[in-house]
Amino acid sequence: MFRKIANGFIDLIFPLNCALCGQFDPVTQRQPLCRACLQSIPYARPPFCLKCARHLKTYNEQGLCPDCLLQPPAFDGAWAFTRYEPPMTNMIRAFKFHNKTALRKTFAHIARTFLTRYGLELTADMLIPVPIHPVRLRERGYNQSALLAQSLAGLTGIPLATAILKKHLLIPRQSELRRKERWTNIQGAFRIENSSLARNKHIILVDDLLTTGATASEAAGALKQAGAAKVELIALSAA
């Protein structure tokens, strides 16, 4: 109680400014962005690829983007809330690499807005964040996908499961590799700790960023080999 009171006085004396533009706005007491910057969020827009949910620039009979036509991912479907362009690029980098974990409040707002805008109601047996290797976890101090999954669990009521899927190979960072190299780099990186927990379950993977889809596809493939009935993906942003 005393800590809450103290924090309240601190907020009155040193009000929080917008994490993007630095301006004060009362809304930043609840999440880090002011109303003007919230209006600049590049939400994903239809038509969506039926597999990865990227924006379809040209329509085809399959309803798939060129990447999914060329190399279909193992997950059954996906939603990405935003396009990976400013200001999402800076926000995700700050969230992922610079300990700006308070941005999860803004990302929860983005998720709620997107789901409401398109009338989507997420249903599944469990949410599983895409894991990172224990060495990366020690370096960073947190798994950004797990923080996002916690927010989504609170938003949707879907249970969170973090003890099933593990990343047991320490590999070069995907962001440092060319597009084609990412698919081979991630092969065999995940393992299942208890396959009975995944068997016949509808699972939603949660990740911060969908680029090639290689990481989410490998994770989905591992879960399906363990007997998962359906594996979908939720990503904060898609490149």
Image (spheres, rainbow, N blue to C red):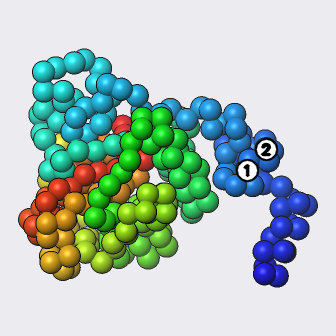
Residue 237 visible to an observer of this rendering: no
- Spatial CA span between label 2 and label 1: 6 Å
| Circle 2/circle 1 CB separation < 8 Å | yes
Q: Position of residue 123 (x, y in %)?
A: 32, 55
Mark 2: secondary structure: loop
Q: Residue 180, how many percent across, how many down? A: 18, 43
Location of residue 184 in the rendering, given as x and y in whole percent from the top left corner: 14, 53
Determine whether 48 is above or below 1 in the image. Answer: above
| Residue ID at (79%, 47%) | 26
Q: Which residue is mark 1?
A: 28
4 to 27, vertically: above or below:
below
The tag on residue 153 is none
Q: Quadrant of residue 16?
A: bottom right
Q: What residue do we see at 67% from left, 51% from top?
A: 32
Which quadrant, please, contains the C terminus? top left
For the N terminus, give its image quadrant.
bottom right
Give the numbered dot on residue 25.
2
Any part of residue 227 in sight: yes
